[in-house]
Structure formats: structure tokens, C-alpha cells
Image (cartoon, rainbow, N blue to C red):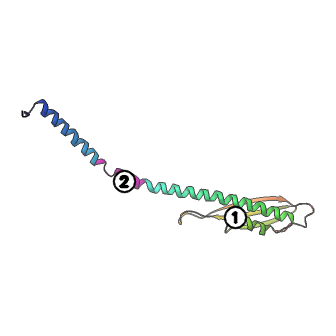
Amino acid sequence: MSAEPGSTRDAVGTRAGAVRRRWRSQVACERGSFTAELAAGLPALMLLLVAGLTAVSAVGTRVACVDAAREAALAAARGESGAVAGTRYAPDGAEVAVTVTGDRVTATVRAPVRTFGTRLPRLVVSAEAVAAVEPGAPGPVP
């Protein structure tokens, strides 16, 4: 029993072969598309990761600056050295400034943020705290 041209068996076999060839050509056409999409999206993902880590570092540095400014203002209001107290609590590389104006002590702490990436601009966060001079204290010390 050979299949004659135009018979049902020949038509089914030809259609199935055409479907297989079409499917193979679609698969071959899409080959490597995941790699191309990954290569295009990976830099954006890395940039987002670096920005997120830098933001977390900035928030942590800001919290440390707030603590240092508060301690510096309170220490200066009690008559101790505010700059020494602020430096003790400040993050690395921070600048502590204490000023006395009448019966108020103002402490300002500025610190650089460690950025993840060498080409990113340097960020600086600051915090300020104000305290009233305590009565009976020997006098505020900046």
C-alpha cells in the first residue's frame, strides 16, 4: 500500500511536516532572545541596586548625625564640651559645630555618605539640634 499523490494519508503527512517546519523556524527565530533581554536589562537592575544601597546608607548616616547633634547640644547645655560629645557619636568623617547664642546651644553635624559606586556624586547629610542652657550649669561650652 503505497500512498498515492493526493490521497488522505499523503495530505496529513505533508500538513504535519509543514507544521513541524513552521514550529522549528519560530523556535530558531526566538533563540537567544532571553540573553539579549538580560543583557539589556541587567545594567538597569544594577543601577537600581546601587541607588537603593546608597539610599539605605544615607538614611543610616542621617540617623547617626541626628544622635550626634542631640548629644552635642545637650552636653554643651550642661557645661561640657559639645564638640567632644558630638564627635564621640558622629559617623566617620563628620564635622561637628556647636554655637552658643544667649540661652540656646545649637549643634550641627555634617557627614559624607558612603556611596556604592565610584562615579556617583558625593552626598552629604546634616542634622541640627537645639537645647536650652540648663540653669545652674557653669556655662555652655562649645
The circle drawn on residue 35 is 2
Residue depicted at x 50% and y 57%: 47
Residue 37 picture location, percent across and down: 39, 51
Part of the protein shown in magenta: 29-40
* Residue under numbered circle 1: 110
- 1 or 2: tag closer to the N-terminus: 2
Residue depicted at x 73% and y 59%: 66
Say few, some or many: other residues with alpha carbon within 10 Å of mark 2 (under 14 / 14 to 19 / 20 or more): few
Q: Residue type at mark 2?
A: Thr
User: Residue farthest to the right?
Assistant: 136
Question: In what quadrant of the picture does the C terminus appear?
Answer: bottom right
Q: Are marks 1 and 2 in contact (CB under 8 Å)?
A: no
Residue depicted at x 31% and y 50%: 31
Which picture quadrant has residue 17?
A: top left
Q: In this rendering, is residue 99 above or below 46?
A: below
Quick check: is 36 in the magenta stretch?
yes
